[in-house]
Image: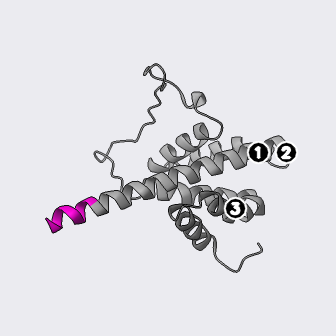
Amino acid sequence: MATDQSPPLIVRDALNRALAGDPAGGGELLLPLIEESARECYALCVMLASTCTYGTRPLGPAAMWRLQVDDVRTGLPGAPDDLADGFGFAAQFVTAYANRDSATTQALFGALARDMSTEAGACRVYDGVIALYAMAIAAVRALLAEERATRNQEGN
């Protein structure tokens, strides 16, 4: 890897850049982690999924997170495969991670990265990781908005 920073610090810097208005620049910081190896890329996916689920709580000890996809045009139930490139993977990966189902996260990543050395395979991996990154950005923005709202309520 070309940087002296550890992967968690790179992810932090990428998210900070996105929050500062430069999501593309933040995404570029992630490219070496995606390209380093399948192992490094899987670790990146786990870090992003961890960010997506930070602060969430299951509804009970036996509760599991489930993925609900609705068709935005019809409002009817949909499927992860109906989502734009990469987002089906990202949504399923985050759901499996939230359920602490590492076998499923590994299987999902394995299916995504099985032909990572080809151009088409690499594009699928980039799409999936960037979709996870977009979800992580949205999660951090939501957490920050919630914190601000709580502080404003406590201040009133």
Query: Which residue is located at x 55 percent, y 69 percent?
Result: 12
Q: Main secondary structure of the magenta part?
A: helix
The residue pinned by badge 3 equals 28
Looking at this rendering, what residue extends furthest in the front direction? 21
The reply to whether residue 114 is visible in this rendering is: no
Amino acid type at mark 3: Glu
In front: mark 3 or mark 1? 3
Circles 3 and 1 in contact, beta carbons < 8 Å: no
Question: Could you tell me which secondary element the residue under label 1 belongs to?
Answer: helix
Q: Which mark is residue 123?
A: 1
Question: Could you tell me which secondary element the residue under label 3 belongs to?
Answer: helix
Question: Could you tell me which secondary element the residue under label 2 belongs to?
Answer: helix
- Colour mapping: one colour
Circles 3 and 2 in contact, beta carbons < 8 Å: no
Residue 156: where, in percent of width, then height?
Answer: 13, 64
Can you say whether 28 is above or below 3 in the image? above
Q: Which mark is residue 1?
A: none
Residue 69: where, in percent of width, then height?
Answer: 47, 30
Can you say whether 154 is above or below 100 in the image? below
Query: Which residue is located at x 59 percent, y 61 percent?
Result: 22
Q: Is residue 42 left or right of residue 78?
A: right
User: Magenta residues, as a range?
Assistant: 149-156
